[in-house]
């Protein structure tokens, strides 16, 4: 099999095996990198983020291939050279990894073509509950809206582990890790795209910074209640969900019901489970009393996200 190796510099080496010979003869194809985008690439352990942008400069045709991920604008920024960013001092390296999603209800995979690009911190012996980091694991941060020049000298690698998460929004296991796998193969084109896409989620360098600033001003400039945040920022109106599935909340508050609703096992009858947990003063509408936990959450969720309750005809308070 023919491979290519990406080394610092950068140097893209094509390993060509001569007929009848067990040896691989390296040929420098850095200036012809566009020809090898679909070849599996071996990444040198010493590779840094800056090597990716130097590769784009060494093969200018790549700028056209990656035009949609703002390759040219990023290269302009990278040519200014690295900067020390104190906020990045806890970052040990940059990592591309595969995080797949599986909707187990519909048996549909998603996100299998996209690589997630992160800054990775040190191993935390005690974990970090605020960031969802378990003891013995590393903290990770997205690179979007971060300083490109502050990351140029950071080591860059591929995590060979594949993690698969539950994508069904209405499953009790939603967003939980459900399976693991391993894959060390990646094409040169995938690797470059993963880096550029991760850095330009909101647009080019200027657009990324503008978004970060405007988001902070819009969301955090004034105090905002949780209810206002969910309705105005997220577009989520749980009152519509209550009206859709319940005749009475009983003794529960709306927040308590939402929390309990998330705990019903997927395959259990939701009404029976709720009565055992909350008593029979909580009344599920007749048409939904045979639904399991997963399906009742779906009815509630779709009603809550469907529309602004202010546009609905009044139906009385629960």
Image (cartoon, rainbow, N blue to C red):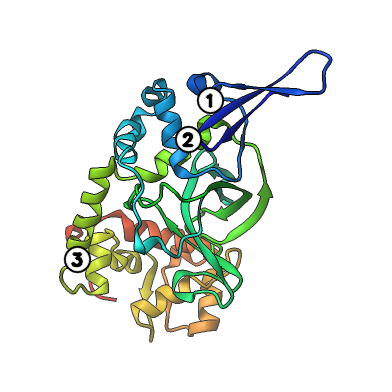
In this rendering, the count of numbered labels is 3
Disc 2/disc 1 C-alpha distance (Å): 9 Å
Label 3 neighbourhood size at 10 Å, few (<14), some (14-19), many (20+)?
Answer: few
Give the mark nearer the N terminus: 3 vs 2. 2
SS for dot 3: loop
Residue picked out by circle 3: 314
Residue 167 appears in the rendering: yes
Residue picked out by circle 2: 192
Between 1 and 82, the one nearer to me in the picture: 82
Rendered location of residue 115, percent (x, y): 50, 43
Is 2 left, or right, of 290 in this rendering? right
Is 14 left, or right, of 49 in this rendering? right
Compared with residue 150, is residue 238 higher up or lower down, i.e. above or below? Answer: below
Is 160 left, or right, of 147 in this rendering? right
Q: Nearer the viewer, mark 3 or mark 2?
A: 2
Question: Is the C-beta separation of discs 2 and 1 under 8 Å?
Answer: yes
Label 1 neighbourhood size at 10 Å, few (<14), some (14-19), many (20+)?
Answer: some
Disc 1/disc 3 C-alpha distance (Å): 59 Å
Compared with residue 255, is residue 244 higher up or lower down, i.e. above or below? Answer: above
Image quadrant holding the C terminus, namely bottom left
Quarter residue 16 falls in: top right
Between 221 and 315, the one nearer to me in the picture: 221
SS for dot 2: helix
Residue picked out by circle 1: 37
Question: Is the C-beta separation of discs 3 and 2 under 8 Å?
Answer: no
């Amino acid at each position: 099999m023919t491979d290519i190796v990406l080394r610092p510099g950068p140097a893209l080496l094509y390993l060509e095996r001569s007929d009848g010979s067990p040896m691989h003869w390296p040929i420098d194809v850095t200036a012809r990198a566009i020809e090898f985008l679909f070849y599996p690439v071996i990444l040198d352990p010493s590779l840094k983020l800056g090597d990716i942008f130097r590769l784009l400069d060494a093969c200018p045709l790549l700028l056209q291939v990656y035009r949609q991920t703002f390759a040219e604008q990023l290269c302009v920024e990278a040519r200014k050279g690295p900067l020390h960013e104190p906020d990045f001092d806890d970052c040990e390296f940059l990592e591309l990894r595969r995080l797949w999603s599986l909707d187990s209800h519909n048996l549909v995979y998603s996100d299998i073509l996209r690589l997630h690009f992160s800054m990775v911190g040190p191993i935390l012996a005690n974990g970090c509950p605020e960031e969802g980091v378990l003891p013995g694991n590393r903290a990770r941060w997205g690179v979007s809206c971060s300083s490109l020049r502050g990351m140029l000298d950071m080591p860059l690698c591929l995590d060979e582990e594949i993690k698969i998460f539950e994508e069904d929004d209405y499953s009790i296991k939603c967003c939980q890790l459900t399976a693991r796998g391993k894959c060390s193969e990646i094409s040169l084109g995938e690797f470059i795209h993963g880096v550029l896409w991760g850095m330009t989620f909101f647009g080019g360098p200027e657009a990324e910074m503008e978004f970060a600033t405007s988001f902070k001003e819009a969301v955090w400039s004034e105090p905002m209640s949780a209810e206002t945040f969910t309705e105005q920022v997220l577009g989520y109106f749980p009152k519509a969900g209550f009206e859709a599935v319940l005749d009475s909340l009983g003794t529960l508050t709306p927040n308590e019901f939402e929390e309990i609703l998330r705990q019903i096992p997927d395959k259990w009858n939701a009404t029976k489970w709720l009565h055992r947990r909350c008593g029979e003063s909580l009344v599920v509408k007749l048409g939904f009393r045979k639904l399991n936990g997963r399906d009742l959450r779906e009815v509630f969720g779709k009603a809550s996200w469907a529309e602004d309750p202010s546009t609905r005809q009044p139906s009385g308070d629960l």
